[in-house]
Image (cartoon, rainbow, N blue to C red):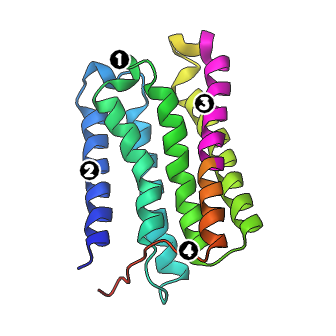
């Protein structure tokens, strides 16, 4: 079995285990963080690449880089909540928005580079995906827990910052993907049959 397969499986198992712990442990750091909602929705994101591949692209090698990059932000967020970093480390939320959107957008970048898309198409898809998902995330956050929390008073400023950082992470990775695609570079992939 491929090391990429083991990494992808380990990330998914850790994610689901931590989500269940957060949703049912009753610990203070999970209160008001919509962990039951995360337990339902995060696995959808984590299994998006395998499901889409199984339905539409089974004849091509499995895109491990995209799968891992798409799943990592959900794990990073869950670990951050599990360790109470959002409430104890002042810069954690900001760093998280930049890094997690770089990772999410990296999944799209990996697919673009793998399929040899041109520089303009790659940059547009990566940044567009990052911008749209950052907006959708902030809308979901508002309805899941911000509108009824003490954070409502500062939510506008925080949301604008989060959107800017998410977009910056997407642009950063989009530019890296453009350089890789321009040089004919390819991200590593491993056949599912190894």
Which one is in front, 16 or 112? 112
Measured as percent of width and height from the top left, residue 191 is found at 38, 84
Q: Residue visible at 25% across and 25% down?
A: 26
Separation of marks 3 and 4 at Cα, in angstroms: 31 Å
Q: Which residue is mark 4?
A: 185
Q: Which residue is mark 2?
A: 14
Furthest residue to the front?
A: 183
Residue 63 against residue 158 in the figure, above or below = below
| Mark 4 or 1, nearer chain start | 1
* Secondary-structure class at tag 2: helix
| Mark 1 or 2, nearer chain start | 2
Image position of 184 (left or right of 50):
right
Image position of 26 (left or right of 31):
left
Separation of marks 4 and 2 at Cα, in angstroms: 31 Å
Q: Residue visible at 67% across and 19% down?
A: 156
Q: Which mark is residue 162?
A: 3
Crowding near the residue tagged with mark 4, few <14, some 14–19, many ≥20 C-alpha atoms within 10 Å: some
Which one is in front, 179 or 12? 179
* Secondary-structure class at tag 4: loop
Q: Main secondary structure of the magenta part?
A: helix
Q: Are marks 4 and 1 in contact (CB under 8 Å)?
A: no
Please tell me whether residue 95 belongs to the stretch shown in magenta.
no
Q: Residue visible at 77% across and 65% down?
A: 120
| Mark 3 or 1, nearer chain start | 1
């Amino acid at each position: 079995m491929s090391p990429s397969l083991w990494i992808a499986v380990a990330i998914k198992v850790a994610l689901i285990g931590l989500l269940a712990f957060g949703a049912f442990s009753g610990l203070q750091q999970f209160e008001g963080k919509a962990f039951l909602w995360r337990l339902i929705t995060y696995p959808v994101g984590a299994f998006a690449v395998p499901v889409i591949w199984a339905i539409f692209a089974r004849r091509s090698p499995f895109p491990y880089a995209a799968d891992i990059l798409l799943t990592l932000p959900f794990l990073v967020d869950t670990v951050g909540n599990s360790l109470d970093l959002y409430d104890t480390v002042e810069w954690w939320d900001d760093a998280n928005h930049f890094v997690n959107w770089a990772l999410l957008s990296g999944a799209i970048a990996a697919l673009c580079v793998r399929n040899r898309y041109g520089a303009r198409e790659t940059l547009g898809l990566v940044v567009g995906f990052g911008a749209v998902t950052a907006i959708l995330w902030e809308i979901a956050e508002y309805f899941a827990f911000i509108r009824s929390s003490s954070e409502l008073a500062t939510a506008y400023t925080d949301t604008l910052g989060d959107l800017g950082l998410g977009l910056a992470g997407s642009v950063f990775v989009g530019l890296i993907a453009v350089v890789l695609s321009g040089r004919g570079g390819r991200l590593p992939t491993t056949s599912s049959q190894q």
